[in-house]
Image (cartoon, rainbow, N blue to C red):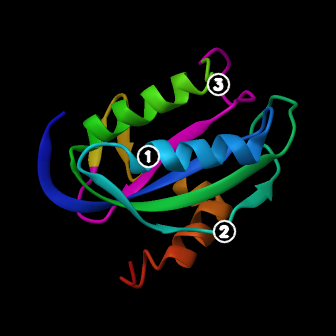
Amino acid sequence: MTESARDIAYIALGSNLGDRHAYLARAREAIAAIPATRIIAESTVEETAAIGPVEQGPYLNQMVAVETSLTPRDLLEALQTIEAREGRVRTERWGPRTLDLDIVRFERQTIDEPSLRIPHPELANREFWQRELDELGADSGQV
């Protein structure tokens, strides 16, 4: 993994299959174990309706703020490894999942690549992400 200057990243956690609380707890533990990364704040866990055209159960969602010196690409790869370890299978877009980890934004970096866009392109469409960012003090510089 490549390291760069330290930055704060905001990661959305979501689960709507199985023991949703356990998936989020294991995700937090795994994120805390990513090299050159530490969790500095966690939002409240909240339940939200699923988004998209696929009929499915509600999600538990949470956001964590991490201080990291990883590049956005390396952080994404670490998060996808965690998802896979927790049984995430990418078959149906917007479908149900054991664990979904999204980089929502970085404090000082933006990325616009075909497979990685930061801030996340759906940020404006997800009120719960905006609430969670506010709770973490993302917009006011409290984190």
Residue 7 sits in quarter: bottom left
Instruction: Classify mark 2: helix, strand or loop.
Output: loop
**Residue drawn where x is 61% and y is 17% of the image:** 89
Q: Main secondary structure of the magenta part?
A: loop
Amino acid tagged 2: Thr
How many residues crowd around disc 3 within 10 Å: few (fewer than 14), some, or many (20 or more)? few
Amino acid tagged 1: Ile
**Residue drawn where x is 77% and y is 38% of the image:** 16
Relative height, residue 93 to residue 32 (above, below):
above
Q: Mark 1 sits on what residue?
A: 31
Q: Residue 142: image x %, image y %?
A: 39, 84
Q: How far apart in space, not on screen, are marks 3 and 2 (Cα)?
A: 26 Å
Q: Residue 48: image x %, image y %?
A: 79, 54
Q: Mark 2 sits on what residue?
A: 44
Q: Nearer the viewer, residue 43 or 120?
A: 43
Q: Nearer the viewer, residue 34 or 96?
A: 34
Give the side of residue 14 with respect to residue 53, left or right: left
How many residues crowd around disc 1 within 10 Å: few (fewer than 14), some, or many (20 or more)? many
Give the side of residue 94 with respect to residue 57, left or right: left
Residue 106 is inside the magenta segment = yes
**Segment tinted magenta in the rendering:** 90-110
Residue 57 sits in quarter: top right
Q: How far apart in space, not on screen, are marks 1 and 2 (Cα)?
A: 17 Å
Q: Which label belongs to residue 140? A: none
Q: Residue 2: image x %, image y %?
A: 14, 37
Relative height, residue 68 to residue 56 (above, below):
below
**Residue drawn where x is 43% and y is 78% of the image:** 139
**Which is closer to the viewer, label 3 or label 1?**
1
Q: Mark 3 sits on what residue?
A: 93
Instruction: Classify mark 1: helix, strand or loop.
Output: helix
Of pointers 1 and 2, the one earlier in the residue sequence: 1
Can residue 121 be seen by looking at this rendering? no
